[in-house]
Image (spheres, rainbow, N blue to C red):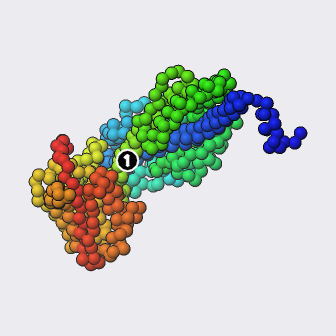
């Protein structure tokens, strides 16, 4: 039989209007419920999937940053270890082939070993292999049946011909069969020792790395660490992790990418993979979670929609024409409430006078509104947390070249027997970090900011001798305890040295003047702290000034970073301007509102 439009009216003609209305209402209701349910399910599934991936990615990135920071600290501890006097004296004996001083050096190095392990608790043991004997902490039992050259660590070091990280294994150099991750280094020293004669092995506790990685994160995901070949760095914490590594899919999924997420099937079941690279080496932190686990909360929504559709079918079948008319009244009421909500009145609520199906819809509508209000609050809180995270991330950045140059200068001054200058530089660097870290607080006092800038300038004077002089003048003593963002002055004086004195060898001058000024705003007088940083350097043209203020510019990294932080803290209340011409120096003016004073211990 061929379908035609008239066929529908033919079979409906014998039906009463009541039945026509009932069937039409039934069909529309069921279709609407089903369409809404299916769309809601897929939209909710997509949203939940995206949010879960985003939250897991944030967790993985944070874990990679924490682990990277920890490993960098470990490298710094080992650099300090290798420039210590006992270590250098030992290398001198190795260079001279003098094995008679072995036990003297073994005792002297024991204290340095202990200091390194206290400075970084992640270190399980340190082992130094030399031609005159092996050196190790006396507090740890040495496995004398095995030497470094008997282990696979030595073979891999010789093959790589560079400092290498070795994945988790049982420690053969010491007793106890402790599982460790090893870092094999060649020493940093000016002593004339052949390249492959001396090796430093740092054993890191595998259990400590696992705690840093955080195997279990939000959403039921499991995190693990892989190397550049997508092989496990630590032991597998679950069968799922081992299955993912053994499948060989990781190498293809995360190769060549620093961070991101993807989906892949394991045993015909979809899994999400989030990953982020470390900055120190080629390791990556990977998180794996099942798609079914992410979407398990939607099972309730799916069955709810099914039951609602069945309930609507039964209810509409039993309704009469009169009852439909009665239902129209509260429906009009509900439409009014919806219109109020449509006009952004989220306080509107449907008033329930009975317990029928429409009342249940009204109750669900009220619950939905409450959930919307709750979601809006959650979004606001998430935005606030994101703003705080951005502030912390922007304020935590520090130029690694400055640290490298400073440590290099300290090293050469020590080599030239300029002990006092080296001591002053170490103290200044220590104080610089202490003031910059500020116990993790985002705000400090202007007095401490001045000290921080002064320590930075002192270090730069040692690094660039006779290049410049400086002065820091505070005209209002009451501003010393002014609450300001940390690391605020240092980027300004850094800009003078990097851009102002780049082509000079001597005669530079930096003047920092801080004073209070009153500004009339909307018939109200407000106080601002005005910071003026002036130098007599080369100056810049208009294009360079714009680039210094531009976000993302490599030239103006310090200035643009500071400008972003000021906007996050103060909004439009803070201002920063640059006045400069080529050959006429540069003046940077920074204005921030005077909001409060703080008084805490250094």
Helix, strand or loop under label 1: helix
Across and down, in percent, residue 275 comes to: 54, 44
Q: Nearer the viewer, residue 89 or 281?
A: 281
Q: Nearer the viewer, residue 509 or 534?
A: 534
Tell me, yes or no, if residue 256 can be seen here.
yes
Q: Residue 494 sits in which quadrant?
A: bottom left
**Residue, x 25% and y 47% (percent of image)?**
443
Q: Residue furthest right?
A: 1
**Residue, x 26% and y 57% (percent of image)?**
574
Across and down, in percent, residue 425 comes to: 24, 55
**Residue, x 16% and y 43% (percent of image)?**
599
Q: Quadrant of the C terminus?
A: top left
Say if 490 sits above or below 305 in the image: below
Say if 522 sits above or below 131 in the image: below
Q: Nearer the viewer, residue 60 or 210?
A: 60
Q: Is residue 64 left or right of residue 472?
A: right
Q: Which residue is mark 1?
A: 387
Q: Quadrant of the N terminus?
A: top right
Across and down, in percent, residue 391 comes to: 35, 49
């Amino acid at each position: 039989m061929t379908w035609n439009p008239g066929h529908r009216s033919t079979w409906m003609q014998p039906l009463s209007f009541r039945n026509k209305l009932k069937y039409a209402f039934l069909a529309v209701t069921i279709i609407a419920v089903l369409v809404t349910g299916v769309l809601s399910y897929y939209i909710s599934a997509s949203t939940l999937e995206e949010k879960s991936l985003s939250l897991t990615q944030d967790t993985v990135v944070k874990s990679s940053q924490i682990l990277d920071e920890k490993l960098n600290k470990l490298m710094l501890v080992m650099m300090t270890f290798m420039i210590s006097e006992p270590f250098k004296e030992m290398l001198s004996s190795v260079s001279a082939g003098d094995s008679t001083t072995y036990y003297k050096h073994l005792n002297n190095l024991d204290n340095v070993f202990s200091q390194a392990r206290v400075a970084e608790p992640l270190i399980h043991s340190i082992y130094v292999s030399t031609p005159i004997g092996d050196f190790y902490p006396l507090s740890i039992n040495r496995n004398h049946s095995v030497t470094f050259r008997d282990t696979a660590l030595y073979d891999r070091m010789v093959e790589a011909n560079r400092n290498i990280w070795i994945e988790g294994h049982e420690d053969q150099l010491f007793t106890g069969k402790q599982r460790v991750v090893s870092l094999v280094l060649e020493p940093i020293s000016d002593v004339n020792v052949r390249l492959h004669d001396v090796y430093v092995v740092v054993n890191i506790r595998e259990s400590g790395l696992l705690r840093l990685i955080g195997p279990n994160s939000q959403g039921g995901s499991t995190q693990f660490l892989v190397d550049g070949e997508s092989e496990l760095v630590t032991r597998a914490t679950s069968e799922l992790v081992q299955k993912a590594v053994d499948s060989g899919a990781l190498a293809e999924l995360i190769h060549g990418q620093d961070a991101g997420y993807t989906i892949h099937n394991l045993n015909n079941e979809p899994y999400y993979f989030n990953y982020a690279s470390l900055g120190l080496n080629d390791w990556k932190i990977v998180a794996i979670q099942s798609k079914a686990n992410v979407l398990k909360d939607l099972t309730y929504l799916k069955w709810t929609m099914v039951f609602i559709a069945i309930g609507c079918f039964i209810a509409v079948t039993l309704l009469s024409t009169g009852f439909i008319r009665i239902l129209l009244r509260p429906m009009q009421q509900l439409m009014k409430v919806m219109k109020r909500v449509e006009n952004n009145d989220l306080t509107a609520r449907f008033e329930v006078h009975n317990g029928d199906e429409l009342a249940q819809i009204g109750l669900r509508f009220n619950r939905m509104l409450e959930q919307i209000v709750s979601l809006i609050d959650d979004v606001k809180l998430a935005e606030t947390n994101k703003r705080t995270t951005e502030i912390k991330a922007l304020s935590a950045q520090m130029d690694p070249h400055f640290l490298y140059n400073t440590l290099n200068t300290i090293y050469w001054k020590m080599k030239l027997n300029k002990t006092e200058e080296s001591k002053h530089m170490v103290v200044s660097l220590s104080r610089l970090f202490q003031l910059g870290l500020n116990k993790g607080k985002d705000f400090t006092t202007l007095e401490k900011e001045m000290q921080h800038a002064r320590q930075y300038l002192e270090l730069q004077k040692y690094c660039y001798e006779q290049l410049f002089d400086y002065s820091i003048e505070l005209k209002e003593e009451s501003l010393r305890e002014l609450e300001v963002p940390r690391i605020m002055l240092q980027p300004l004086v850094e800009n003078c040295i990097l851009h102002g004195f780049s082509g000079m060898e001597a005669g530079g001058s930096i003047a920092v003047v801080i004073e209070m000024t009153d500004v009339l705003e909307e018939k109200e007088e407000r106080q601002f702290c005005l910071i003026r940083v002036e130098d007599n350097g080369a100056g810049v043209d208009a294009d360079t000034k714009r680039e210094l203020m531009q976000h993302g510019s490599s030239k103006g990294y310090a200035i643009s970073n500071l400008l972003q932080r000021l906007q996050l803290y103060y909004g439009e209340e803070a201002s920063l301007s640059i006045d400069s011409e080529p050959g006429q120096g540069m003046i940077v003016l920074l204005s921030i509102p005077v909001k409060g004073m703080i008084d805490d211990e250094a």
